[in-house]
Image (cartoon, grey):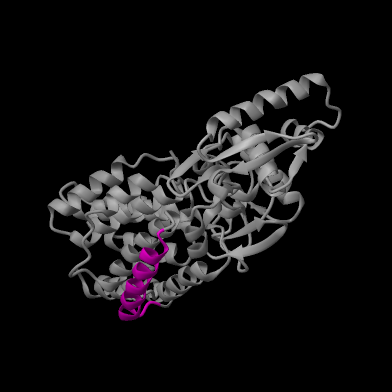
Amino acid sequence: MDSLIAASARALAAGDALGALKRVALRDDPPALALRGIAMAQLGEHGRARELLQRAARRFESHETVARARCVVAEAEVAMAMRDFRGSTHALSAAAATLEAQGDRANALQARLIAARRLLLLGRLQEAAQLLEHSDTRGLPPVLAAVAELTAAELAWRSLRVEVARNALGRAQQAAERARVPALLAEVAQAQDALDRPAARRLSLGTEQPLRLDEVSALLASDALVVDACRRALGGGVEWHSLARRPILFTLARALAEAWPGDVDRQTLIEKAFRTRRPDETHRARLRVEVGRLRALVPTLARIEATSRGFALRPCEDRAVVVLAPPIDGQQASVVALLSDGAAWSTSALALALGASQRTVQRALTELEATGRVRAIGQARARRWQAPPLTEFTTILLLPAVLPIA
């Protein structure tokens, strides 16, 4: 490695992208192309960075397997920053195995962290946990240690293990201070702030109270009967039932919980559950069927009693009834939650993360754009979507697969 390449690499490691470019901007050899690509990525020019990294990987000799693998890892990180999840992860896995076999522990761990962060963005928490389970950062650069702890913290707070997340963020803070990279310090500070911002609203007995993530975790572990409108679930303590794929049952459960200890008249329940303002006898019959299904789902948690007006929720063992509402209202809340990280997402990436069709996501984006909550960048296949970062509250509970519910 010549002196200019070495100096450029040291500048990149310290977060000085412009300093790195000054040393290799006019060079066209494979190591210089790779360094230019990484520098462009740090400056936010992801398309150009990807092109440079691909050129570098093609121009390295066949026996330079480690250099090629490093280019694959860098390109995968750029793709993640672009929220481009279309490609296969086999190349990244192969690159990690090559680097591990050649003794490059740092870049092998970097590859695994990129794969884990990609899985976290897609809401696949269990797979991300398996990747991070055997990650060992001892003896590695502090920048990499900080990124590893940030990834572990995100997995913990997405699983509502708040104390574990705080401890991981504390270790990330220490590693970032040793690394002295301003962007990394800012990312750690932003993550710490998210834990202290309101994550949901508690609705009970006609009152509304904002809750931090640790307070949400305590509420879900209590003996209260909770209708969770963030994850569309019903339960308390160790017993939970997902209603994400049963929207009518969830609508009925939320309406009954919001009215507790009172009842809800049949007309209101029909309008909310079936979205009609002209109910007839068929709707009343359907309401009885759906209420029966809800009764059968939660016999150990609550009773649903018929009253002269309609129906009332009666929790077992004198439990309190609480509705855990999202920090923001609307059908498009999950889309806003994904876009609020400040990155530009494609429609296909949003659909993949949300487990919805692209057409459904396009409709949601169109409605959000009309109200000024998101904006489009680019045209046709290059179009990306962004939303301003949310500073008043955190949208952790609105992200995909916040917590698995049996």
**Looking at the picture, how far across and down is residue 178, in whole percent?**
30, 80
Q: Which residue sits at x=42%, y=63%?
A: 162
Query: Is 49 positioned to the left or the right of 357 in the image?
Result: left
Left or right: 22 with respect to 144? right
The answer to whether residue 43 is left or right of residue 326 is left
Asked whether residue 57 appears in the rendered view, the answer is no
Reply above or below: 114 against 300.
Answer: below
Residue 212 figure quarter: bottom right
- Say which of 334 and 116 sits in front: 334
Q: Quadrant of residue 114?
A: bottom left
Principal secondary structure, stretch drawn in magenta: helix
Residue that extends furthest to the right in the rendered view of this protein: 278
Q: Is residue 170 visible?
A: yes
Q: How many discs appear?
A: 0
375 or 265: which is nearer to us?
A: 265
Give me the residue at 70% from left, 61% from top: 207
Residue 284, relative to residue 66: is it above or below? above
Left or right: 214 as drawn, with respect to 369: left
Magenta extent: 161-181
Q: Is residue 17 magenta?
A: no
Quadrant in the picture for the C terminus: top left
Quadrant holding the N terminus: bottom left
Let me know if residue 168 is in the magenta part: yes
